[in-house]
């Protein structure tokens, strides 16, 4: 049975089915990672020879796990996120999602993979200025060919989840940076992804807005069991997730487990 959960700071309810997560965040099969990178390497050619920007990165993310990838600018965290998203092909290694190596996928397969398996929030939110808030949230469903009579109620429900219903007809130029992030988050979740990727966006928000957003992200993870990977260079946020992966010089330098992943009863 699906349970409605109240989002912090609002009377709005979140239905776990809306975000594509399981009502039992972790089940007996959750020891198998929902995402695994194996010896992931990326290099670029330079006049003096190949330059490694990511080297032998091994990462495993379980269903329901919230992971922060922490590192300074140039540490390789965005390169890793782009590889997981299928936006930048690695030079070597594997990325296993749902039992398939996405490195071996064609461009067409990668496009379907991004639409079906991922929700992505980019550094600049990638909100389309020519579209209203509602139309932005509808966009993934529009691209998937869903008719308006089906996508409109779903988009409105997601706006309700993020306390944005009153902004549905506003344009991006009329809303704040924090509100744009919530629109981007609603859009990323509207197609019920397997994994949510958030790349450094939190680093560009003011401290109060960032704290509010981080609480919302943790709430979504804890109440729906969605696997989340977030990158940041801000050490103030590393207490939020289950696990922190530290990157430096394109490599994983250490992994810290903050708290255990909750098991279903």
Image: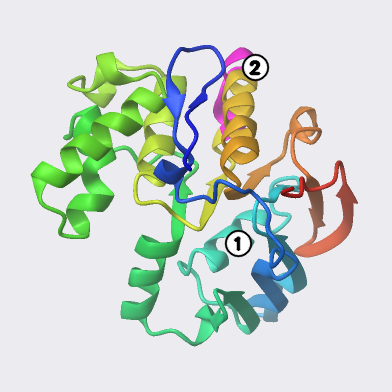
Count of numbered badges drawn on the protein: 2
Identify the mark at residue 79; answer none if there is no mark: 1
Q: Is residue 67 above or below residue 217?
A: below
Secondary structure beneath label 1: helix
The quadrant holding residue 55 is bottom right
**Residue, x 65% and y 77% (percent of image)?**
43
Location of mark 2 (residue): 207
Secondary structure beneath label 2: helix
Asked whether, in this view, residue 155 is left or right of residue 88, the answer is left
Identify the mark at residue 232; answer none if there is no mark: none
Q: Which residues are magenta?
A: 202-209
Residue closest to the eye, 254 or 151: 151
Distance of label 2 from label 1 (alpha carbons): 25 Å
Disc 1 crowd rating (10 Å Cα; few below 14, some 14-19, many 20+) is many
The quadrant holding residue 138 is top left
Residue closest to the eye, 24 or 96: 24
Q: Position of residue 171 (x, y in %)?
A: 21, 23
Membership of 85 in magenta stretch: no
């Amino acid at each position: 049975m699906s349970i409605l959960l109240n989002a912090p700071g609002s009377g709005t309810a979140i239905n776990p089915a809306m975000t594509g997560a399981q009502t039992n965040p972790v089940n007996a099969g959750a020891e198998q990672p929902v995402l695994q990178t194996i010896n992931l390497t990326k290099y670029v050619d330079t006049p003096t020879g190949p330059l490694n920007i990511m080297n032998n990165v091994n990462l495993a993310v379980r269903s329901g796990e919230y992971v922060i990838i922490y590192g300074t600018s140039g540490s390789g965290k965005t390169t890793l996120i782009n590889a997981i998203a299928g936006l930048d092909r690695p030079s070597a290694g594997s990325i296993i999602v749902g039992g398939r190596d996405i490195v071996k996928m064609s461009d067409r397969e990668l496009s379907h993979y991004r639409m079906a398996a991922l929700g992505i929030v980019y550094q600049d939110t990638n909100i389309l200025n020519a579209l209203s808030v509602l139309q932005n949230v509808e966009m993934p469903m529009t691209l998937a060919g869903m008719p308006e009579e089906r996508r409109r109620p779903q988009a409105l429900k997601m706006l309700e989840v993020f306390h944005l219903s009153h902004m549905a007809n506003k344009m991006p130029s009329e809303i704040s940076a924090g509100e744009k992030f919530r629109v981007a988050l609603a859009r990323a979740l509207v197609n019920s992804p397997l994994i949510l990727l958030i790349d450094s966006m939190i680093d560009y928000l003011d401290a109060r807005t960032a704290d509010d957003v981080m609480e919302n992200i943790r709430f979504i993870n804890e109440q729906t069991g969605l696997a989340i990977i977030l990158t940041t260079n801000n050490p103030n946020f590393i207490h939020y997730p289950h696990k922190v992966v530290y990157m430096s010089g394109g490599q994983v330098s250490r992994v810290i487990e903050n708290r255990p992943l909750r098991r279903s009863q």
